[in-house]
Image: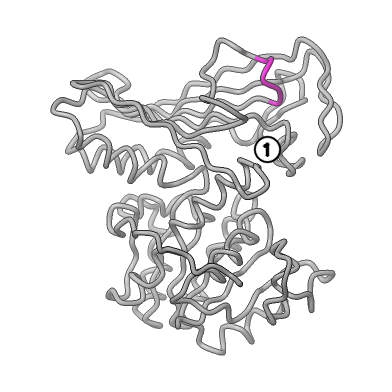
Amino acid sequence: MIPTVVWGTGNVGRAAIRAVDAHPGLALAAVIVHDPEKVGRDAGALAGLDRSLGVAATDDAEDVLAGNPGAVVYAASGDIRPDDALADVVRAIRAGAVVVTPALYALYDQRNAPAEVREPVLAAVAEGGGSLFASGVDPGWGNDVLPVLVSGLGTEVDAIRCQEIFDYTTYDQEDSVRFLVGMGQPLDYDAPMIAAGVPTMVWGGQVRMIARALGAELDEIREHVERRPLESTVETEAMGSFEAGTQGALRFEVQGIVDGEPRIVVEHVTRIHPSCAPDWPQPPSGDGAHRVIVEGNPRIEVSVEAEDPKGNRAEGGNATAVGRLVGAIDWLVAAEPGLYDALDVPLRAGRLTERRK
């Protein structure tokens, strides 16, 4: 069993605790939290499980890392604290741990990461013997291994489009929805997620990885953004009111340009209510899906819908992204220490879960 630490207990961390607990080759060794009110609480309660896991949360990261864990799932946010997130991850690698995380966007495509991000990680790998695999939560597999896999089913590939289509009505993360994405804000609000250069920073690495896998040479990466207002006020159970005339839908693309045309595209279509921008792409059913479209011969379209046991697709999407990361831990432990990306780490088969009595 590989002693595994989960660092952070937000949307990703909760799913990570559940995934580590369910994995037959991993043992939950510790849970690191930042909120003083969570210190001492059982990991099972923090993860929303109906049973105790016998692991009390702690805010003493140094003590946990001193115990030489085999792996760390770094689930703390890197959105507004990228330098701190990098420093945390480097500490864990230097302690000899295999680290998997969605927090370090620049390292999704680690070969082209800025030196100021890549070099500290490589130095920690050389010093401590740990490893790092960074992949996204939107989810990463939907913008890297899935489109690459599907592209191999055709004989001719003209273009690839990866879509996340999501309705935030039931999403329980108000700060991200209102202030990071801009839902409920005036249409001229400067939403951080779509500030010039930010979509490329977050998703450009995945566009580059697809291009690399397909042997394509990118001319450049471009961004395209559209916003639509709500026609009427929307009431949500988790986040309150979103007023008519404010942003109700957001659509943006990160376009990989090949021979002057957008041929590798990562697209996000998000709404605060399904009535907004009904002409934009819609999920096959429910409130969200991830879709890959390969234009070529033949044309291939694959949609993936994931739900947690309560039918929540936001949590289901998080769980699939976490499943990819946690499922890679045993492979990374067996591999040479290093810095890996999604094209390096094979997609691991699932396991039939032993039924609980």
Give the overall secondary structure of the magenta segment: loop
The quarter of the picture where residue 216 lies is top left
Q: How is the image coloured?
A: one colour
Residue lying at 70% horizontally and 41% vertically, measured from the top left: 176
Could you tell me residue 46's position as x and y percent? 73, 66
What is the span of residues highlighted in magenta in the rendered image? 272-276
Question: Residue 276 vs residue 199: left or right?
Answer: right
Residue at the farthest left position: 155
Say which of 100 and 127 sits in front. 100
Residue 213: quadrant of the picture: top left
Q: Would you identify the image quadrant in which residue 171 lies? A: top right
Report the front residue among 35 and 351.
Answer: 351
- Horizontal and vertical percent position of residue 343: 28, 52
Q: Is residue 310 magenta?
A: no
Label 1, residues with CA under 10 Å away: few <14, some 14-19, many ≥20: some
Helix, strand or loop status at disc 1: helix
133 lies above or below 312: below
Residue at image position (43%, 56%) is 324
Amino acid type, mark 1: Leu
Q: Is residue 177 left or right of residue 83?
A: right
Quadrant assignment for the C terminus? bottom right
* Residue 48 against residue 159 in the figure, above or below: below
Instruction: Specify the quadrant that holds the N terminus.
Output: bottom left
Q: Is residue 190 above or below residue 204?
A: above
The residue that mark 1 highlights is 180
